[in-house]
Image (cartoon, rainbow, N blue to C red):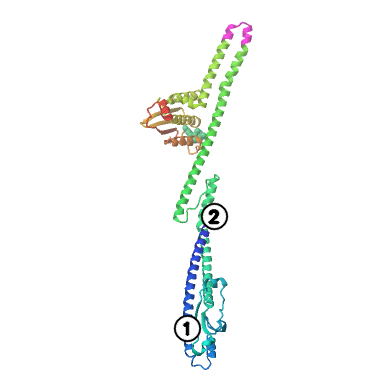
Amino acid sequence: MPLRRRLLLLVALVLAACLLVASVLTYWAGLRKIDLEMSSAIEVGDSAVMEAMASIDSSTDPAAHVRRTIASFNGDRHLVARLIGPDGEVVDVSQLKPPADPPPAWLFDLLGRHSYSRTFPLPGASKNLGQLRIDADPHNEVSEVWEDLKLKLLIVTAFCAVVLSLIYAILGRALRPLEDLSAALHRIGQGDYTAKVSETGPQDLQDIYRAFNRMADELNASEQQNHRLNEQLSTVLEEERSEIARDLHDEIGPFLFAVDVDAQSIPSHLSRDAKDAVSDRAKAIRQNVQHMQLHLRSILSRLRPALLIDQGLDHAVENLIAFWRTRRPGITFNSQVTNERFPANIEETAFRILQEGTSNAVRHGKPSTITLTARISSPRTLEVTVSDDGTGLSATSNRGFGLIGMRERIAILGGKLNVVTSNDAQGVTLIAELPLPEKSKQTRNSYLATSAA
Ligand SMILES: Nc1ncnc2c1ncn2[C@@H]1O[C@H](COP(=O)(O)OP(=O)(O)O)[C@@H](O)[C@H]1O
Ligand SMILES: [Mg+2]
């Protein structure tokens, strides 16, 4: 059940309980009032009858005197006087004033149960007429309580209606922000992290809205980061694929063709018994195969850098430089890389920075020299740098994924990246600082052993 309806129901139940208590109190008050009124009516009737009885003996016609006494009660609101004959039959009775608004039978049953009466035996000569009895009749009194009750019920019903409508309206206003929040949560649930709620309203809710908006921002940021990483991944994959395809085509293809040609020529040399020519061809085939093996190794090391790093960061950097030297013989590569071992994730991040930094320098900077370093700069930091003397970053430089990806990898390790550049052809220097864990002097194998334990 919606919160609004629940709260309304609760309020309605509380009001109904109040109404019940008020009804019980009204009932008791009604009973008391009727009891008081009836008792005092009997007392009044008592003194009126006593007064009439006192003068009955001096009366010439006692029967007429008794009739007059009974008639004097005609039109009374509470008392009915009766002459009860010697045989117990009612000989004469006065007329009660009928109630203007007769009460319903159930109310009369509830309130008018008690009977109040008093009997007066007739004195002296009139003794044989029987006895006089007065009864207090609660009809008029119950009717008064009934009228009172109707008015009270009307007022209470109007009050409840007003209170409930006010609460309904106030709840509607008060819960609207929660409805907004729920709608925003729904959007977040459907992956729309741009959902926001307005940070207005009561202080306690404002705190919730602020927390919600912060959460949405964080989700949005990590969604975008994921998006970027995915794009970066596919760009890198695409670049690597096309580079490998080019390598296979340019470096392996011609040699395979040469091997094929050499191998085809061998039978004709053999038929001519030209042993020297056969031996030359075989040598040429071996040279071509060696060349292809070299290139295959470089392609494989690009495909599986982890394998490369397995032999150390220094070894991996040598391979990286060898890869670029064959492709960019005009560039001078320098390197100074520590031969210490670090945890696998740090070595891989360090290698990726050196790889992407070198690739950026070669592709974008037109440098003549590129220098790669990796050293322990303070006891707990591995400092990795790539610097070139190329054109440097310019204001129009693209916002590519390489630098962003680098920053994200470094951030995951709790490190930082500094890109130093000027646009006056001083090149670019990337300085990455990767914090090292306590046991940075351990060997890589002992890292693996510790982490496995
Ligand atoms: N060493 C560099 N020399 C000159 N420009 C660079 C260098 N490194 C990066 N840039 C510029 O910064 C941009 C962003 O680099 P990066 O994030 O690696 O993306 P990408 O290499 O995919 O373009 C490059 O497009 C290039 O314009
Ligand atoms: Mg790049």
Q: Is residue 63 above or below residue 392?
A: below
- Give the residue displayed 46% in from the left and 85% down from the top: 47
* Secondary-structure class at tag 1: helix
Quickly name the residue at label 1: 46
> Label 1 amino acid?
Asp
- The CA distance from mark 2 to mark 1 is 65 Å
In the figure, is residue 432 to the left or right of 2? left
Question: Where does the image place residue 256, in percent across and percent down from the top left?
Answer: 59, 18
Residues in magenta, as a range: 266-279
* Secondary-structure class at tag 2: loop
Q: Is residue 313 above or below residue 121?
A: above
Q: Earlier in the sequence, mark 2 or mark 1?
A: 2
User: Is residue 137 in the magenta section?
Assistant: no
Question: Where does the image place residue 208, in percent across and percent down from the top left?
Answer: 46, 51
Q: Residue furthest top?
A: 273
> Label 2 amino acid?
Pro
Q: Quadrant of the N terminus?
A: bottom right
